[in-house]
Image (cartoon, helix red, strand yellow):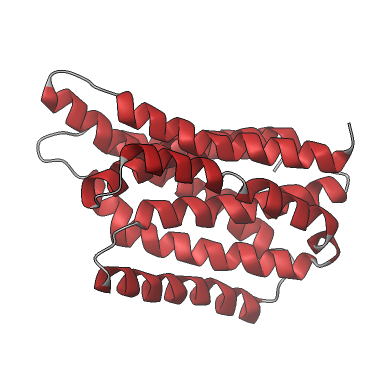
Amino acid sequence: MDDWIEVALLTLLAGGAMPVGALIARFEKIRPDWLEEEFRHSVVAFGGGALLSAIALVLVPEGSSNLSPPLVVVCFSSGGLAFLALDVFLASLHSPVSQLAAMLSDFIPEALALGAAFASGSSAGPLLAGIMALQNLPEGFNAYRELTASTEIRARRVIVAFSLMSLFGPVAGLTGYFWLAAYPTVISGIMLFAAGGIMYLIFQDIAPQVKLERHWAPPLGALAGFLLGLIGQMLTGG
């Protein structure tokens, strides 16, 4: 199989975890109610932990490897400020989609990096795609819950939209494979920009949703999500 076809398939499968997570969120029903509520908070925490692992273990190390300290500061800070501006804009529209923004800002840079990795001859592509899928699953779950709870968008439309968004994976992966592999500094800048944006979203929108009075299990989801990324990073030889 040609490398570019493998890149397209792997990134499509990784993106497909987003609508799968939404489907699980749609049909998931747990009784009693207190257990269902704790489960939902735990999934939010797990997604936050997975995003934090993406920052600490993939986006920042890979992004900072090709840039000078001043450029690292500029790219990372710009990402946080850009997502702050986006958050203010969405608040003015009464459209809370923080989980959705976090999901895409994590998925697209990683897909770019996966394509570039294939172009450079790395053998870690399939495992990286698997890690991306495991991150997208809880993020799709959380984004579905957030959209259906705070908007009037029908559940079916959300799932269809998530399915269409999974196509961003092959587009980003092939872009990294064919064009950006020759410009590692550009990929690094994109990854750090995304890392700054995700960091802002974690502490502005995602982490506050985790706390649940008189329940202590949800924060363990954050630990599990970060551990997922750590194990994946170790398996890829990082």
| Residue 148 seen anywhere in this rendered image of the structure | yes
For this rendering, which residue is in front, 29 or 44? 29
Q: Quadrant of the N terminus?
A: top right
Query: In this rendering, would 175 be left or right of 55?
Result: right
Please report the residue visible at 29 percent of the width from the left and 47 percent of the height from the top.
Answer: 146
Question: Horizontal and vertical percent for residue 209?
Answer: 24, 48
Please report the residue visible at 27 percent of the width from the left and 44 percent of the height from the top.
Answer: 148
| Residue 132 seen anywhere in this rendered image of the structure | no
Q: Quadrant of the C terminus?
A: top right
Question: Horizontal and vertical percent for residue 6?
Answer: 79, 36
Toward the left, the furthest residue is 214
Query: In this rendering, would 29 be left or right of 186?
Result: left
Please report the residue visible at 89 percent of the width from the left and 37 percent of the height from the top.
Answer: 2
Query: In this rendering, would 31 be left or right of 6?
Result: left
For this rendering, which residue is in front, 210 or 112? 112
Query: In this rendering, would 3 be left or right of 43?
Result: right
Question: Horizontal and vertical percent for residue 204?
Answer: 30, 62
Determine which quarter of the picture holds residue 143. Answer: top left
How many numbered marks have been drawn onto this rendered protein structure?
A: 0
Q: Is residue 4 above or below residue 61?
A: above
Question: Horizontal and vertical percent for residue 193?
Answer: 56, 68
Please report the residue visible at 74 percent of the width from the left and 41 percent of the height from the top.
Answer: 8
